[in-house]
Structures are given as structure tokens and as C-alpha cells.
Image (cartoon, rainbow, N blue to C red):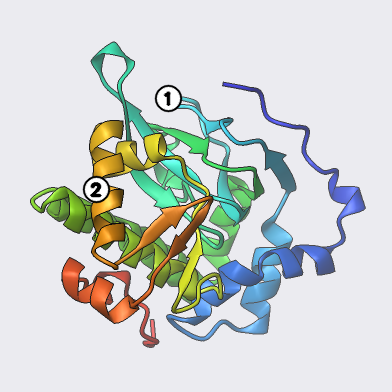
Amino acid sequence: MSSAMPPFAMSSVDRGSIGDMLSDFFRTLETRDALGPTERDALVGAVSDVRVHPEGDTLIRAGQHAEHSTLLLDGMVARASYMAGGKRQFVAIHVPGDFVDLHSLLLRRLDHDVVALSDVRVALFPHAALRRISEEHAHLTRLLWLLTVIDAAIHREWTARLGHSAAVRMAKFLCELHARLDLIGGATPQGFPLPLTQAVMADIIGLTPVHMNRTLRNLRESGLAVVRDGLASIPDLAALRRFADFNPAYLYREPEPR
């Protein structure tokens, strides 16, 4: 994998700019509960660095001691596990507004890599700053905890998805990504950007590249979805959701007092 590109110097990025960069993150939180100005300020003040990584870069390596957690600002990343013989399986996908390794605050290392599926921009939150938030902002701490609980819910859904046909698994994946991107204004009823190769999608769904090509063709010929040239086009979102039997309840997008 290529090495990371140099981070932006924080001296060249004022705190107002950091607040703008965190807009998707704020939206992710505020969908679930109100976020107060003091809590916003605490999050902005906790950012120590903003970095960019090219597609294919490994942001975090399994077993590496963690001193900070990484928030995705732009692009798409995946958690990757490797099996005997180097076979790769993606076990989670993250979109802008997601913490990709908030759990490393307590685990102190990951058991998987985090890799860039496109050019990405991330913000770093030192664990010392996150611990300070946990000590001084109880409600915000519960919101951050909620994000890790939702990550676990998504993992359970991905596991359950394995019991379905390839076409249904892919349809469920497209429905989930649409719902998660719609949360931050990154999707329309007609589709969303999907900068993933068929090989990457095969590693997400658990198929061979040949089987993935056939699955995408089936969805296209059924009029359910067209995945091509970095875009997922959805002629009829309701029909795709019916085919996938998609229920977004596991994403916990409804506002509740936390």
C-alpha cells in the first residue's frame, strides 16, 4: 500500500474551518438527538489534525497502537480483514460523518486494517481529548457511544445478509448505503455516488468478481439498479427496497433523547 500523504498543518486551518469540515458528523449526531453549542465546540476543539489519503492507502494497520481516533470527512473507507493466502474481506464500509475507529479509544488497537476506497480526508481526535470529553460532557459521550452501538447493529445486519442470494445481498447493500448517505445529503431518490470497483464490491458482498459481475447484470436487467462509472442509479427506490426486504430500523435514524 502507498504511504499517507502529509497532513494539513493545523496552523493553516482555523477552528471555523474545522467546524465546517465536521458538518456531516454534526448532522449524523443531530439526526439522533440535539447537539448543543458547547458540545459542538468541544468536538471542534478536540481535532488535532486533518489529513488526506489517496485511494488504496492503509490509514490504520491491525495491531498498531492507537493514540487517536479517525473521523471520515470525505470519501469512503473500509475495514479489511485478511485470511490465509492473503484473501481480503471487507467487514464494514464508512461514509463521511463516520468515526472509523472510535472503539480504539478503549481497545487501543484494531484487529483489522482501515483502507481508503477512494481519495479521502479525515480528522484526527487524540484519545486524550476524547477522554476529556467523556469526563466533561456526559450527553455528548452517550452520543459517541451510540455511534459505536450503531456500528455493531450494522455488523449484525451484514452477518444476517449472508443468508440471502447474491442479488438480495447486493440490493441490501445498495439500500443501506443510500440510507446512510441520504442522512448527510449525499443521495437522491435516483441514486448516489459509488466510487467502488467490482472487485471491491465483491470483497464487500462475499462473491467472486465473476459472480459480482453477473449479480450487477441481474439487478440491471431487472430494472432495480445500475452500478456503473462510479454511480449507483436507482430507477425505483421503493422497488429496490421491496426486493431487498430492506428495513432501515437498524440504522437508528430517529431522534430520541439520549
Answer above or below: position of 99 versus 28: above
Which residue occupies 10% across, 53% down? Answer: 164
Side of 92 relative to 97 (left or right): left
Mark 2 vs mark 1, foreground winner is: 2
Side of 121 relative to 160 (left or right): right
Q: Secondary structure at mark 2?
A: helix
3D distance between C-alphas at marks 2 and 1:
35 Å
Callout 1: few (<14), some (14-19), or many (20+) C-alpha neighbours within 10 Å? few
Residue farthest toward the front in the current orientation of the protein: 221
Q: Nearest the camera: 87 or 37?
A: 87
Is there any visible trace of residue 156 in the rendered image?
Answer: no
Q: Nearest the camera: 68 or 154?
A: 154
Q: Split into 4 quadrants, where in the image is the N terminus?
A: top right
Q: Secondary structure at mark 1?
A: loop
Spot occupied by residue 88 in the image (x, y as percentages of width and height): 33, 27
**Residue position for label 1:** 63
Callout 2: few (<14), some (14-19), or many (20+) C-alpha neighbours within 10 Å? many
Q: Split into 4 quadrants, where in the image is the C terminus?
A: bottom left
**Residue position for label 2:** 215
- Kindly identify the amino acid type of the residue bearing the numbered disc 2: Thr
Residue farthest toward the top in the current orientation of the protein: 85
Side of 247 relative to 91 (left or right): left
Spot occupied by residue 246 in the image (x, y as percentages of width and height): 21, 71
